Image (cartoon, rainbow, N blue to C red):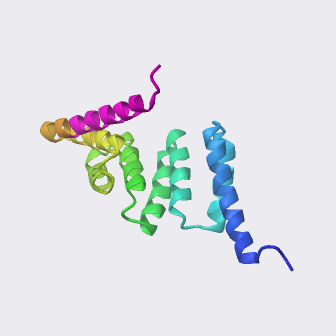
């Protein structure tokens, strides 16, 4: 009798490729990360996290159209994904489309208001659209969240 059922084995295999992709990404091995995530995606074509990481790799490599396609697939599976919306907004900003970037960035901030980077991207979109007050508000919130994070880090440092 096998130790694991075939269904459990499939789960472990999926987790293996996804985890391997994360490890390669952290090690700066983007091509290997992409290969691992592509293997994961073949096993689970609608996995939002895997699609996000592949879109992230595309965005980092300047393949913005490829990133956009991956993000469209991720958002079809989970329209409220804060991270997928934020990355889509960033891609659209890089493509010079701040008006299109606004909705996904506003969604990202609404879903994850504690993430300063999402506020920063939204501020950039507002700035590019000439909405100075909205941009100033979002830049201020970004700075507040960044300061809070720095204070939390300082509090963790042991003092002699």
Location of the N terminus by quadrant is: bottom right
Please say whether residue 153 is one of the residues in the magenta stretch: yes
Q: Please name whichever residue, 96 or 84, is drawn nearer the observer in this view of the structure.
A: 84
Vertical side of 152 occupied by 54: above or below? below
Q: Residue furthest left?
A: 133
Looking at the magenta stretch, what is its main secondary structure?
Answer: helix
The quadrant in which residue 130 appears is top left
Residue under the point 17% across and 39% down: 137
Please say whether residue 135 is one of the residues in the magenta stretch: no
Q: Is residue 77 left or right of residue 33?
A: left
Q: How many marks?
A: 0
Q: Is residue 66 left or right of residue 128?
A: right
Residue under the point 35% across and 48% down: 89
Q: Residue furthest top?
A: 160
Q: Is residue 20 left or right of residue 99?
A: right
Q: Please name whichever residue, 50 or 128, is drawn nearer the observer in this view of the structure.
A: 50
Q: Position of residue 134 (x, y in %)?
A: 16, 42
Residue under the point 37% across and 50% down: 86
Q: Position of residue 54 (x, y in %)?
A: 56, 51
Q: Residue furthest bottom?
A: 1
Q: Please name whichever residue, 87 or 99, is drawn nearer the observer in this view of the structure.
A: 87
The segment highlighted magenta reads: 138-160
Q: Position of residue 19 (x, y in %)?
A: 65, 53
The quadrant in which residue 122 appears is top left
Vertical side of 106 occupied by 78: above or below? below
Q: Residue furthest front?
A: 160
Residue under the point 63% across and 41% down: 30
């Amino acid at each position: 009798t096998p130790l694991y059922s075939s269904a459990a084995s499939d789960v472990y295999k999926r987790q293996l490729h996804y985890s391997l992709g994360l490890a390669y990404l952290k090690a700066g091995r983007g091509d290997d990360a992409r290969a691992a995530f592509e293997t994961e995606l073949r096993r689970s074509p609608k996995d939002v996290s895997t699609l996000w990481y592949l879109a992230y790799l595309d965005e980092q490599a300047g393949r913005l159209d490829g990133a956009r396609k991956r993000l469209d697939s991720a958002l079809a599976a989970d329209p409220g994904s804060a991270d997928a919306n934020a990355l889509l907004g960033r891609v659209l900003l890089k493509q010079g489309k701040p008006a299109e970037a606004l909705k996904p960035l506003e969604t990202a901030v609404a879903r994850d208001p504690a993430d300063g980077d999402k506020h920063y991207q939204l501020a950039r979109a507002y700035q590019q659209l000439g909405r100075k007050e909205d941009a100033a508000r979002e830049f201020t919130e970004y700075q507040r969240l960044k300061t809070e994070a720095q204070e939390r880090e300082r509090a963790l440092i042991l003092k002699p």
